[in-house]
Image: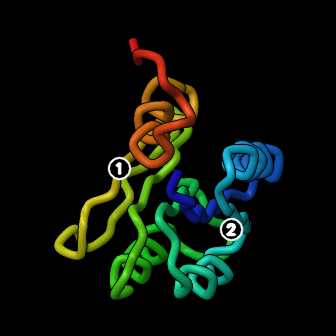
Amino acid sequence: MQRRRFLIVDNNEQESGALVQLFESLGHEASATWSGRDALELASDRFDLLLVDQHVADMYVGGLIERVLRLSNHPRVVIMKDGGNCKPIKYDKSLGECQFFDKGQSDLMYQILRTEVPEFYDGPVN
């Protein structure tokens, strides 16, 4: 198994804590923060995946995404949104694409995680 590194940016400590526990239980390294500024400092290390909530407490999420995508070894970026409450997130798409998933759509989350952490979910996604 290839050990992967995950960075979670979410102001909901319960949700981010659950993701950290999940990734660590599978033998991976995971860090969480509520702060976009902290995430930028952490992202300068090599992470495989950045899971970021659509609402970042201390900066605009589009600005965070652009700055992360400008890193030479930027991680794959997945934005977690809250259903219909998501306003369009503006960022320079020429820097790279991001994936989105609705926190309420667990099947899509499983697909993303299965790509990054194949041992997480080995059954079919409906």
| Amino acid type, label 1 | Gln
Residue at x 53% of width, y 54% of height = 54
| Amino acid type, label 2 | Ala
- The one of 111 and 25 positioned closer to us in this rendering: 25
- Looking at the rendering, which quadrant does residue 9 occupy? bottom right
- Looking at the rendering, which quadrant does residue 5 occupy? bottom right
- Determine the residue located farthest toward the front in the rendered image: 1
Q: Is residue 126 at least partly visible in the picture?
A: yes
Q: Which mark is residue 99?
A: 1
Q: Indicate which disc, 1 or 2, sits on the residue closer to the N terminus.
A: 2
Mark 1 Cα within 10 Å, few/some/many (few <14, many 20+)? few
Q: Position of residue 26 (x, y in %)?
A: 67, 45
Residue at x 35% of width, y 50% of height = 99
Q: Position of residue 41 (x, y in %)?
A: 61, 87
Q: On the picture, is 61 further left or further right than 125?
A: right
* Image quarter hosting the C terminus: top left
Secondary structure of the residue carrying numbered label 2: loop
Q: Which mark is residue 59?
A: none
Q: Is residue 84 at least partly visible in the picture?
A: no
Q: Position of residue 91 (x, y in %)?
A: 32, 70
Kindly check if marks 1 and 2 are in contact, taking CB atoms under 8 A apart as contact.
no
- Above/below status of 55 relative to 103: below
Mark 2 Cα within 10 Å, few/some/many (few <14, many 20+)? some
Name the residue tied to disc 2.
Answer: 57
